Amino acid sequence: MGSNSFRLVVYGFEKGSWWALTDEIREAVRVSEGLGAEGELQAEPMDRAMHTAAVYAAFCEASGIDEVDAVATSAIREAPNRDDLLKAIKKETGLKVRVISGEDEARYGWLAMVNSTTVEDGYGVEIGGGSAQLMRIEGRELEDTCSLPLGSVRLTEAFLPSGKPSNKELKAVRRHVADELEEVDWWPRKGGRLIGIGGTIRNLAAATLKQLDTPDIDVQGFVLTRDAVEDLIEELADKRASKRDSIPGTKPDRSDVILGGTLALATMMDEGGFKEMEVSEAGLREGIFFECLLEDSDPPLFDDVRRESVVNLAHRYRTDDKHVGHVAKLSLELFDSLGEAGVHDLGDDERELLWAACELHDIGVAIDYDDHHHHSAYLILNSGLAGYTSREQVIIALLARYHRKGDPDVSSLGDLAKKGDKGRVRLLSGIIRLAEQLERSRDQSVKAVEVSVPDGKVVLRPKIRRGDPCVSLWSARRNSGLLAAAVDREVEIDEG
Amino acid sequence: MGSNSFRLVVYGFEKGSWWALTDEIREAVRVSEGLGAEGELQAEPMDRAMHTAAVYAAFCEASGIDEVDAVATSAIREAPNRDDLLKAIKKETGLKVRVISGEDEARYGWLAMVNSTTVEDGYGVEIGGGSAQLMRIEGRELEDTCSLPLGSVRLTEAFLPSGKPSNKELKAVRRHVADELEEVDWWPRKGGRLIGIGGTIRNLAAATLKQLDTPDIDVQGFVLTRDAVEDLIEELADKRASKRDSIPGTKPDRSDVILGGTLALATMMDEGGFKEMEVSEAGLREGIFFECLLEDSDPPLFDDVRRESVVNLAHRYRTDDKHVGHVAKLSLELFDSLGEAGVHDLGDDERELLWAACELHDIGVAIDYDDHHHHSAYLILNSGLAGYTSREQVIIALLARYHRKGDPDVSSLGDLAKKGDKGRVRLLSGIIRLAEQLERSRDQSVKAVEVSVPDGKVVLRPKIRRGDPCVSLWSARRNSGLLAAAVDREVEIDEG
């Protein structure tokens, strides 16, 4: 129960295997609208809050949710009359609302960040409706935190008119935010790694993504630059508040307050010396959920976020662990041997993308066997793979897309492309395609591959665990063309 | 084991719930290449056949397939030396190959057609590599059938050069096909309903689809016109055989023989007076599979192909039967009541599409709850829903796409669009959206809806089975806008 919206989110999970968001209702309650002089909640917003709480409680009851955790944040926490609201909710709906402290709020935000990105040392920001949380992370631990009254609803009500704001008004917001930041002595001056979460930031990332040439992907892992934030401010400030949802990616029920939050973010980046921010879709609610999912770990952190997010996705689509694990093993062996032999000069980054693509190459079978390479790519692009940048997600999707056939078309990378992508994706696709065929019978009968490179050729000698390797050899020979083209050498596959 | 290719297809199923193709290998064996004077199989093609049979047998063994049915058709059946090949296969691989008669072949083709289309009375054609099967269907039964030596490989070898064919050569093929057809006294002169199956026809449909502006859909249900077939012939004949795979949609290993099969089809349509043909993706292999899946029915036919294909798709993605069934019930009640009250004039066709969309609107949750309306549409477009035309499939996908939010954009129908689609899709989406919200708590607590239309308004009065209807009423009221816009009236939702 936040200042701007109340959200009901439902998670399904099997511990140690997978978790996923399975249902969600969102209501722009605006409980903090028109707060009184002492921060009292007003009658109308309280009515809306009551009603929404009743609806959510009825939903949980009707859909047989096992465990409900109702959580309220700053707007309610700071209201002197909060108990009136909470008692009424308890009485009418049976919901026991847990009012969490600013510290808890920061802790959940931190859990969301470190469990959805690879950050070890850095800073975090979450912009809510009422307040904004700042964090400093060191060795994945939460080192410092503070909650400032710089939420988007609060700043909008205090500083911004409903029409187009003047430059003076915009400057006043920035100055106010900068003044508040003065108090935070650990906020840096020279930048570092910055992670952003929360609805306002997700919305800004979505709006920026829409203006780029990229495949249709989640904002998870998107890198929002300082310049892009300024561009958005310009665009937002040029419209009346009620018209700001005409900017693609902007949610209608957030459009009238988003400018306040964006100015806060821009100032925080400015003052901190940050040129860019990594966006995560996770937030307070995931933080709360992770605490439950990972209750056996202290602190509740995934060991390796990238690995966990890939395995989670694979398990959601009931992939055959043995088969995909073996395709990964063979692919990495090929990658390493070819690298050692000087046939390519790709490094650990590409090696890890290859691994992820191997684990995920077959998830599309859950949609349909026909064209499952396309479906795997679709699922990967839509999954918001935690710990990977947008660019990495698209490359993993491309490797899955081309694991069976076709010459990789990397044009879909669009604005995310880098020099050498064509060669990179062809080589990695060539490897996974060959490994998949060596494991075509799905029984791990080809247990390894020896690589040698005589006379400018590449010779592969499969080692057979058992049985007749004819399917594998037959399939591999007819699918070695892409690798051969990628390394510009003949690829020969010996009898096992 | 056909003349052109050997295919290994694996089906997974739970009887009475779902079935799906789960794996497939295809190999262009060309066993009938260069047949001897008496139709003897030659040494090299027999070697290829042996080798492929061995690979397939090893695959079945390694992947733990429960039941294997190896079937050979005309090329092998008609070869005087077929037993040499079959004995060798038996000895080397353990596979007992079942050589089926021309009648069996037609019977399986018929089973594929009547179980994947809504044909009651009509004609069927399947063009294979060696032979072509013609069928006459009456009351869903196979009334007449014959197998003619007019397969694409056979016609190509007998009549067509490897370079560009001359007009004289093209005419000679048509004349030969027409001569053979003379013998089939039940082949019509004045057309009727024609269904086409088999690889050649699927390939022609795919090539035609690629030239149209449509979403990316399967060829299942696509209507191939006589004119489109002539256009393809012109395009194919203008290229050397080896270059014909440059036509998008044409498979490389079929490109050198496809012209022969296309000429056969064109002549069959001409002589029969058919202006168009409905394409089904099902074929001999599905016919064989249906005989097993439906072994408790005699003949093994689905009662209602459209209903079965929708329910099959829903079950594949483990949809919540109770919930989607109830959304369907409420939607159809709304549709009927609004129709009776004169608020719309849509008929049974639209009513059935509405039903199908209701059953399928949530399948996208299997991909991700976020944006599941998009995912449902993606799955529907990729499923090749049997019994529905391409246009109907796209409309069902659109209704699923817009069941939660947004104003329907029907432009994706492209060349499949008809006048009035915008209004049609808005009304149906408006209905499903409202029904979904009335069932938002997923517990069927709103058991029905009474509709009245006083003073140009639409008033809905939900009937409550049990519990507190607040979620449903709340959700429905905030989602009645699309229906209101579609019927251009205020929509009011009373207390239950």
Image (spheres, coloured by chain):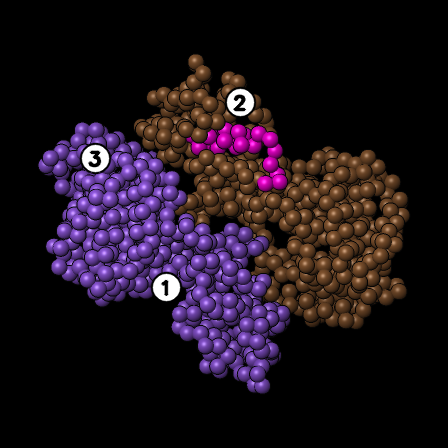
Chain colours: A brown, B purple
Neighbours of disc 3 within 10 Å: few (<14), some (14-19), many (20+): some
- What is the C-alpha distance between the residues marked 2 and 3? 42 Å
Give the mark toward the camera: 3 or 1.
3
Neighbours of disc 2 within 10 Å: few (<14), some (14-19), many (20+): some
Q: In this view, which residue lies farthest toward the front?
A: B167
Residue B50, image x, y percentages: 23, 32
Badge 3 element:
loop
Residue at point 72%, 69% (across, down) = A48
Please name whichever residue, B151 or A397, is drawn nearer the observer in this view of the structure.
B151
Q: Chain of mark 3?
A: B
Please name whichever residue, B364 or A214, is drawn nearer the observer in this view of the structure.
A214
Which amino acid type is shown beneath numbered disc 1?
Arg
Rendered image: mark on residue A23: none
Residue A418, image x, y percentages: 61, 33
Q: Which residues are magenta?
A: A414-435
Which amino acid type is shown beneath numbered disc 2?
His
Residue B100, image x, y percentages: 17, 46
Residue at point 72%, 67% (across, down) = A49
Disc 3 and disc 1 in contact, CB within 8 angstroms: no
Residue pointed to by mark 1:
B307
Residue pointed to by mark 2:
A344
Residue pointed to by mark 3:
B33
Q: Is residue B195 magenta?
A: no
Q: Is residue A104 above or below residue B93?
A: below
Q: Chain of mark 2?
A: A
Are the residues under marks 2 and 3 on the same chain?
A: no
Badge 2 element:
loop
